[in-house]
Image: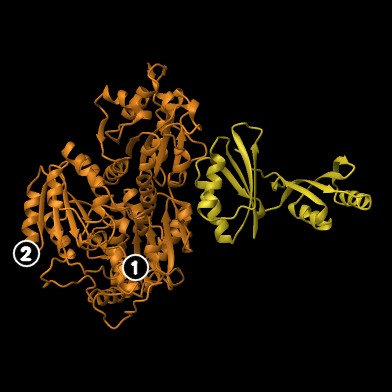
Chain colours: A orange, B yellow
Amino acid sequence: MELSGADILIQSLKDEGVEYIFGYPGGAVLHIYDALFKQEAVKHILVRHEQGATHAADGYARSTGKPGVVLVTSGPGATNAITGIATAYMDSIPMVVLSGQVPSPVIGSDAFQEVDMVGISRPCVKHNFLVKDVSLIAETIKKAFYVASSGRPGPVVVDIPKDITDPRIKVPYKYPKKVHIRSYNPATTGHKGQIKKAVDLLLEAERPMIYSGGGVVLGEASKELTELSRLLGYPVTNTLMGLGAFPATDKQFIGMLGMHGTYEANMGMHESDLIIAVGARFDDRVTGKLDQFCPYAKIIHIDIDPASISKTVKVDVPIVGEVKPVLEQMIELLKESKKEPNKKALEAWWQQIKQWQNLDCLSYDHDSQLIKPQFVIEQLYEVTKGEAFVTSDVGQHQMWAAQYYKFDKPRRWINSGGLGTMGFGLPAAIGVKLAHPDADVACVTGEASIQMCIQELSTALQYKTPLKIINLNNRYMGMVRQWQEFSYESRYSHSYLDTIPDFVKLAEAYGHVGMRIDKPDEVRPTLEKAFALKDRTVFLDIITDQTENVFPMIEAGKAHHDMKLRVAPGINTDTELA
Amino acid sequence: MRHIISILMENESGALSRVAGLFSARGYNIESLTVAPTEDPSLSRMTLVTTGSDQIIEQITKQLNKLIDVVKLIDLAESAHIERELMLIKVKTTEINREEIRSMADIFRGRILDITPTTYVIELTGPSEKLDAFIAAIDRDSIIEVVRSGATGISRGEKGLHL
């Protein structure tokens, strides 16, 4: 079968099983768009800005585990996609981005809409390719999907000069079943000796902590993590990216850790004598001050990426491998072992944890006349019965969603953790809804974040992806305001939005339903009303208490036991920021 | 500590910039870098000299290994190895110092490649330290220009960096 480059590209996507492609046409990709027009298997979602395309593909990928696919044109199309590519890169999300390029003969001549996409994207992709010949398209696409979704996943860019997709030049097509890249052999199973050593250490521990991250979600290892944790009976804390990997309603779950983690999780880490890090990368928002991180603990670290091991925190037992098979092996060894966890020590440890839990670090004022954002998230959890997919933007609302929505399943909590990209939530929600048309999809956002990709409301209408947008509107960039309050003597430099649109009218202008509330007793009925409108996108503009802050908080550069709490229980309340 | 990292990588455009980009993005030092194709035209061999604590060198080698274009690498400093660098140095000569510079080149086993009434071009190979020593030994003011290839190296014995 002889096909043109453009047809080969689309046929390759079909053969790869691609369902959706998120994109925006332009000069350099017109041949490709013409090929798209002639078929129906690969459905194209026309976004309103290329950043939206990458986030939508990202949301699709995070909620399904399958790579998200993006198609953008050269120059500004490609540069607009960069933020979304970097977002996916920081959170290890599989994505394949196809970017058009000016025709090969004019590359390097500063041609119209030319940009060195391979060069610009290099620092924020797992790998990238420039296709130099029509006959290489199929193989390159196969390689791109293989690299993006194997090992530690990540985005891959394939830059395609326009002449390569010329409809007049046809070559034989065959999509490779498998590709081999001699220099790329990601680890699979872990080292047996190390796993044995880890199990021995686990059974000797007196104050153990299971610290699990996004790698468990990416590696589809929630079941195994849960089984191991229950077998041991040890406390579990999740990172922001790991929420849902272990059920939040389980009695062994002691909340998220890190900068806005719970008191019990952070104190637990600090006092622990054995940490097992599972698919987590010791991010600075998790560790706080490095030289005071878990001072009494031996550390076991399971990660697929050897470069993640001992990058910031030196570990005692590194295990390089896919989380799932490693955990399976551990479970097997534990079941075979004659030794059991130290019951007495564990009892005392849980006693200590209960004491910390008694502090009720997530409590807030329930009698306020103003809507408390935490209350909204709790109500959202109840109204959706904990079953919704929740996307978020970045800031206070993100932390509240993470703290108060109890995720029991993986892939339900969709947020930009590593890069912290405002504008992520709405387009990501579109991608999630396309992949899960029957599920409730809520986008928890703020009036600042939502405006960064607001144009995608139009996309949501076109493709009939009914979303519920929960806009926690306090007129401030809340997290910026919070930091300014704590460490800049409340000098709120440019964090207040003097003018914001009438979101109800805006939603209506985009063809959706808008609702606004400002009283606590309106929250529940309005949420119920919104979720009852199954086939409509509802923009819920919720006017919240402007002074509310996210607690607990470990300020930058401080250690886990040095937390700022809402009610100071005689522990450190120092407000100085590093 | 100084490390010589020897890298076998795909001989493709862009491979070099991935390595250079990694070093600048993560704030690692590059003291010198040299690269050329091997006997297998699909592979290039790069020798990179860098400095850093053990922890940094460990990260550098891990991060390099993550690059898809990197096939294999070794840290030559970890075992017995031979290091060589080529230097071409052009010096101003006068009737008084001509003889002295020539004998200096002899002592360092250098070769004089070009002679004019007022200059010499001297070729010198050896470990980078030896080239440093030569520069230190001759009069600074007489140096017109110095070209160094950057260090390259190979391990001793049967062990080797190959596919």
Above or below, comparing residue A28 to residue A389 in the picture: above
Q: Secondary structure at mark 1?
A: loop
Q: Amino acid at mark 1?
A: Pro
Above or below, comparing residue A120 to residue A332 in the picture: above
* Chain under disc 1: A
Q: Secondary structure at mark 2?
A: helix
Above or below, comparing residue A141 to residue A173 in the picture: below
In the rendered image, which quarter is residue A367 located in? bottom left
- The answer as to whether the residues below labels 1 and 2 share one chain is yes
Between marks 1 and 2 in the image, the one whose residue lies nearer the viewer:
2
Q: Amino acid at mark 2?
A: Asp
How would you rate the neighbour count of disc 1 (Cα within 10 Å): few for under 14, some for 14-19, many for 20 or more? Answer: some
**In the displayed structure image, the side of residue A310 where residue B42 appears, left or right:** right
Q: Position of residue B9 (x, y in %)?
A: 57, 40
Task: Using the image, tell me which numbered label, if any, was put on residue A341.
Answer: 1
Q: Position of residue A423 (x, y in %)?
A: 28, 50
**In the displayed structure image, the side of residue A109 where residue A37 appears, left or right:** left
In the displayed image of the protein, which residue is found farthest to the front? Answer: A498
Task: Using the image, tell me which numbered label, if any, was put on residue A156.
Answer: none
Q: Which residue is mark 2?
A: A521
